[in-house]
Image (cartoon, helix red, strand yellow):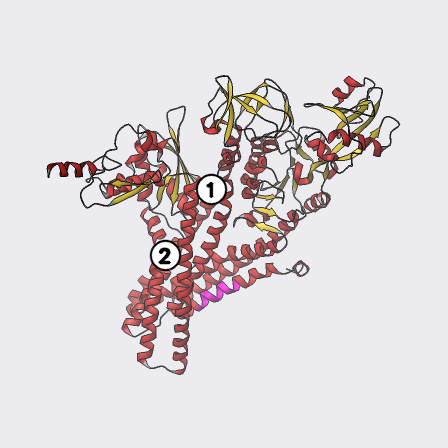
Amino acid sequence: MTDSRAASDALIEPCYHCGEPVPEGVCLYTEIGGQARSMCCPGCQAVAAMIAGSGLDNFYRQRTAYSERPAASETPVREQYLIYDQPELTDAFCQTQEDGSVSARLLLGGITCAACTWLIEQSLASVPGVTEAAVNLQQSRLDIRFDPLVLPLSEIFTRVDALGYRPRPFQASARREQMRAEYRADLRRLGVAGFGMMQVGMFAVALHAGDIQGIQEQYQGLLRSFSLLVSGFIVYYSAGTFFRTAWRHLKQGALVMDLPVALAIGLAWLASAYATVSGSGQVYFDSVVMFTFFLLLGRFLEARVRQRHANNWFDAESALPDAVSLRRDGRWITVPRSQADQGEVMLVQAGQTIPADARVLSGNSAVREDTFNGEHLPRTVSIGDTIYAGTVNVEAALEAEILGSYAQSRLAALQRSVEVAETEKPRLAKMADRIASWFVAGVLLVTSATAIAWWHIAPEQTLWVALSVLVISCPCALALATPAALASAASALRATGVIVRGENALESLSRTTHLIFDKTGTLTEGKLAISRVELLGELTEARALQLAAGLQHWSNHPVSKAFSHIQPGEVFQDVNYKVGAGLQGKLDGRQYRVGSESFCREFCPALPPPPDEQRYWIALCDAQSPLAWIGLDDTLRAEAKAVVRSALTGGLELGLLTGDSSPQGKLLARELGIDDVRTGMEPQQKMQRVQSLQATGAVVCMVGDGLNDAPVLSLADSSFAVAGATDLARTQADFVIVDDVLTRVTDTWQKARDCRRIILQNFAWALGYNLSAIPLAATGHVPPWAAAIGMSLSSLLVVANSLRLNRSPAKEKGL
């Protein structure tokens, strides 16, 4: 028996988290590292599940001892976050700064609007030890900087949790998983509300018909009872988000638009429930569920816009190679990029994307850096030059010393610039929330004053009159005034090939004072083409181009693509390629060269200077005489002049910001009539220029296409990305031109101005309606059913006016 018990004890698997024996009969498991691990209690299971769910399984492989078992006396909320006070768990989402403070990035579940960002930021800003707190609404991300000696990380998690949000370490995979879960939850709430609206609507039709034609009391009570049950579930399940948001902000002393919405839904349902139970008065179950459905529909569509564009840019690091070739112990080995350390020597073959910022130790090549400057011509690099992660080595192999990790790279800095630029726009939403809070306060004061007055005049009418005031003053028409017009304009623009991203884009575009263009790929086609040939010998132009194409056939330099449409003819022999210079080859016993001025003049001293500086010139020569200068240029878009002319006629100030440091930018601006031109601009410099304009009161619209344009596209008040834009540029732009027609920029601007005029008309009607209807309701002249009809008609009028934006361009002239 003793041996059997010992053997049984030996088979007992300890808790994988704390090491304590698992009690007999307890079957709790958590999947860690692809295996089901035994847990001794729900506390250990909860903590282990959080660690595994946050992608921090590596903690268990690196620990030197079992973790402490969660204490039963601690509160459950604080308990589940204590694990993040262990440094080995925080490396993935925290970074220690030079002054000793810690920057952490958390993923938040449950945030829905700019008011949520305000609540979280304001609540954390007052916590001792917190230096900065900023919420990115699109990414559901909290960036916080704090002093770990004053404030433990677990306390930050706990405080965010106490506000009603679900914090966890920020990771791209976790964010995608959260967005999928939020989408499913939103869709379920919307579906339940829609189905319930149809059911309650059918009962309402029968009740209204019964009021007109007569209905027996028992059947009326039955229909009301069914409506009570169905609408009650919808209020609890679907409209619950309005009540939770309103209560969450009320606890922090903030008034948001969800408060009158929740009050209107709640009071209308309670009043209808009272009428059903007492058998007197009117019921408004159909108005309650309809109001709930359409509000949820609007928010669902808004959330889908945010989510659709959030996935594409999550991690610029994913564009880098997964492996890197390093020289270790005198030989080249391939290791994961994450294992490459600063100071190690890596090998980058021609055609490969450079995996890390590095300094060239051996080799000569050219690097295409359109990632950073948007330009198609590569930069020649040699020993001592710096090359950057995310750029492409296009010519020859390079050996280079790694300068640091990805977090220290120029590409990471660019991505951080995008994130910083994104946080600028939610500040506008904060002002809207503060204005809305005054409106909400006014509505509540008027309703309260009305209720007090009627309590002294006719107590039995107090509830119904107050409800009439609340319903008739409910800001439905005001709330629809802007989104209905924006949605209508966005639909019209989609039909013309422009995708609108973001609800504030059209409103911002309508107020534009400065229109700023990128050059390469935006005003130009973004590819080199032969624009001029200067013959220097007896060859014809066709023959000179044929010889040059024959040599360029042996190159993968971007310049060679300009000759790809020319049939080379004879095949050159003994072709040699000099990196960053040109090519030399033999044909019919003669040596020919094509390439840079210095490369060809070394071979043919009689070569004259290039004709001008307006183009990128390459020379063609043989050993005896120069043959031709071939000028390459980036072709101007056919519609560029019309776009500039239309913008100038409309009173816009134009500007050109380009990463091209050659004279091309100024020449192009002069040709188009753009006075403000700045060349050789890096992404941060473009952002600084836009910020300086905005500081003077300018409303800036930016048009671009490259990854380097993503930060400034996000920072501008409104922005366009052309069809050939990079994924990151497209996700940061407010408008994406899918058919690659540049005139869509000015067409969209005109539509935005029309949209703004419609919005002002909607506001005028909505405010006029509220100002005239509230006194009537407060004096008892408008019963609740008439208030509900008036609210609905007011909203329908706003929607109908907004639909005028969908009219065809031929009819819009009389708008």
Q: Which residue is mark 1?
A: 427
Residue 628 in the figure: left or right of residue 147: right
SS class, disc 2? helix
The kind of secondary structure the magenta stretch mainly shows is helix
Q: So how many labels did they put on this image?
A: 2
* Residue under label 2: 444
Dot 1, how many residues are within 10 Å of its Cα: few (below 14), some (14-19), or many (20+)? few
Residue under the image location 48 percent in, 60 percent down: 477
User: Which is nearer the eye, 757 or 53?
Assistant: 53
The residue stretch that appears in magenta: 789-798
Q: Is residue 71 above or below residue 446?
A: above
Return the residue nearer the eye: 767 or 502.
502
**Marks 2 and 1, how far apart at CA:** 26 Å
Taking the spot 35% from the left edge, 72% from the top edge, the residue there is: 282
| Label 2 Cα neighbours within 10 Å, binned few <14 / some 14-19 / many ≥20 | some
Is residue 613 something one can see in this rendering?
Answer: no
Give amino acid for label 2.
Leu
Name the residue rendered at 82%, 19% in the picture.
Answer: 623
Q: Position of residue 539 (x, y in %)?
A: 87, 29
Quadrant in which the C terminus is drawn: bottom right
